[in-house]
């Protein structure tokens, strides 16, 4: 027989509130050009999130947080350099780390914050020391927030858009350089509890964003997810076939915020017993309470009575490393890169370094 303790889905008491912050520093002006995917993507995504939010508040952010008091329908019209300048604040020397710290402080168990920025770090001459400091600042900020909000989670989307405007180098690294109709990366950060982020992700999947969605990464604490276990053919009776028991786990990975490629990578699963192997994971395409099937093989001669299959967290993906620039120089050779993005994301990762397991599946086995 196969048996497992029931794990029930988290139910939201109320819809989350949504705060949206768009950086309006001078470096963002180039995304406001005609034909920019940035404006279409931001408006479409925020508008869709707004449908499922309790309330939505809009802000510009640089050195200050500046409320946008008009309706969402007029928001996209004000995504232009003129409105950015009128909003005010220090548009010439904004600090991404300080902005993130302010935004993280606005998050609660009922509020999700969205931060939209090119995430370029303004490097001084001693760049490596600076990058390490920024990494530690981000890590400390999230770590401290998790003391009061332990299920705080972060999802980062890499986007790209046509850029037509001035690229501003860090002080002493070159004069501003005009970029004409090139694609440049920018990022959408979603920060909130894992159940609130999961709620929005279920309603508005980030991987289905139109207008140049590129990649994503998420960080979340351990969460118990709903699952059920059966023998092949949906029976609870455990019978061996060709010297192996074959069982099927149906699980809902959505609360973990993990991307599908990580979920389907069998190397991310670790069974307690060496006689138990995860051999296949695949997405459920039909409407279901669960998101994935997990096929598990168990040697017939095993003495396993209790099993615990753990789904491990993944490291920093290759796309982050390939997108990172540490020099802050020569934008023409680094058009598809972002200065310091690796340090920012590593800072987030450090705040979750003790979270080595995303979720697990405990069940008992009894032979006939």
Image: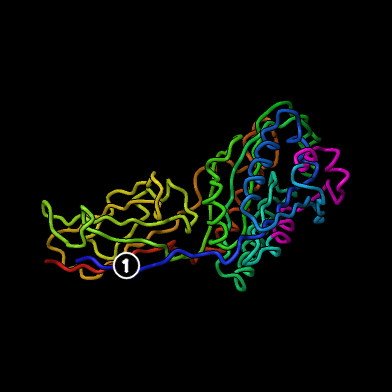
**Percent from the top left, x then y, of residue 65?**
80, 56
Q: In which quarter of the image is residue 111?
A: bottom right
Screen quadrant of the N terminus:
bottom left
Element at label 1: strand
Tell me, yes or no, if residue 173 can be seen here: no
238, above or below 144, in the image: above
Left or right: residue 44 versus residue 254 is right
**Percent from the top left, x then y, of residue 325?**
63, 42
Tell me, yes or no, if residue 330 can be seen here: yes
| Residue at x 66%, y 50% (from the top left corner) | 50
| Residue at x 62%, y 62% (from the top left corner) | 139
Q: Nearer the viewer, residue 360 or 176?
A: 360
Left or right: residue 137 versus residue 322 is right
Can you identify the residue that label 1 sits on? 362
Q: Which of 182 and 289 is in front in this view?
A: 289
Region rendered in magenta: 74-103
Q: What colouring method underlies this structural image?
A: rainbow
Give the main secondary structure, helix, strand or loop, of the magenta stretch: helix
Left or right: residue 156 versus residue 300 is right
């Amino acid at each position: 027989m196969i048996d497992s303790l029931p794990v029930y889905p988290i139910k939201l008491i109320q819809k989350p509130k949504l705060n949206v912050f768009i950086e309006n520093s001078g470096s963002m002006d180039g995304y406001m050009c005609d034909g920019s995917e940035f404006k279409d993507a931001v408006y479409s995504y925020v508008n869709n999130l707004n449908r499922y939010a309790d309330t939505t508040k809009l802000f510009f952010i640089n050195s200050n947080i500046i409320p946008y008091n008009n309706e969402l329908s007029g928001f996209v019209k004000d995504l232009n350099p003129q409105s950015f300048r009128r909003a005010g604040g220090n548009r010439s020397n904004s600090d991404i780390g300080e902005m993130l710290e302010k935004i993280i402080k606005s998050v609660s168990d009922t509020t999700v914050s969205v931060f939209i920025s090119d995430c370029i770090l303004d490097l001084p001459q001693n760049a490596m020391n600076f990058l390490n400091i920024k990494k530690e600042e981000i890590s400390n900020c999230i770590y401290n927030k998790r003391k009061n909000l332990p299920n705080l989670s972060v999802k980062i989307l890499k986007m790209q858009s046509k850029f037509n405007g001035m690229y501003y180098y860090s002080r002493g690294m070159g004069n501003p350089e005009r970029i004409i109709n090139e694609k440049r990366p920018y990022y959408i950060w979603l920060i909130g509890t894992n159940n609130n982020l999961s709620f929005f992700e279920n309603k508005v999947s980030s991987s289905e964003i139109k207008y140049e969605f590129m990649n994503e990464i998420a960080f979340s604490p351990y969460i118990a997810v709903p699952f059920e276990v059966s023998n092949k053919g949906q029976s609870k009776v455990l019978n061996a076939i060709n010297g192996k028991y074959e069982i099927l786990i149906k699980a809902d990975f959505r609360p973990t915020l993990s991307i599908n490629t990580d979920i389907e990578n069998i190397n991310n699963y670790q069974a307690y017993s060496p006689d138990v192997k995860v051999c296949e994971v695949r997405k459920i395409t039909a409407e279901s309470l669960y998101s994935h099937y997990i096929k598990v093989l168990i040697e017939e001669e095993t003495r396993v009575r209790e099993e615990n299959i753990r789904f491990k967290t993944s490291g920093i993906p290759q796309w982050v490393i390939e997108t990172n620039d540490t020099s802050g120089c020569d934008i023409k050779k680094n058009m598809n890169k972002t200065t310091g993005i690796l340090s920012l994301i590593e800072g987030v990762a450090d705040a979750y370094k003790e979270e080595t397991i995303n979720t697990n599946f405990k069940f008992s086995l009894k032979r006939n």
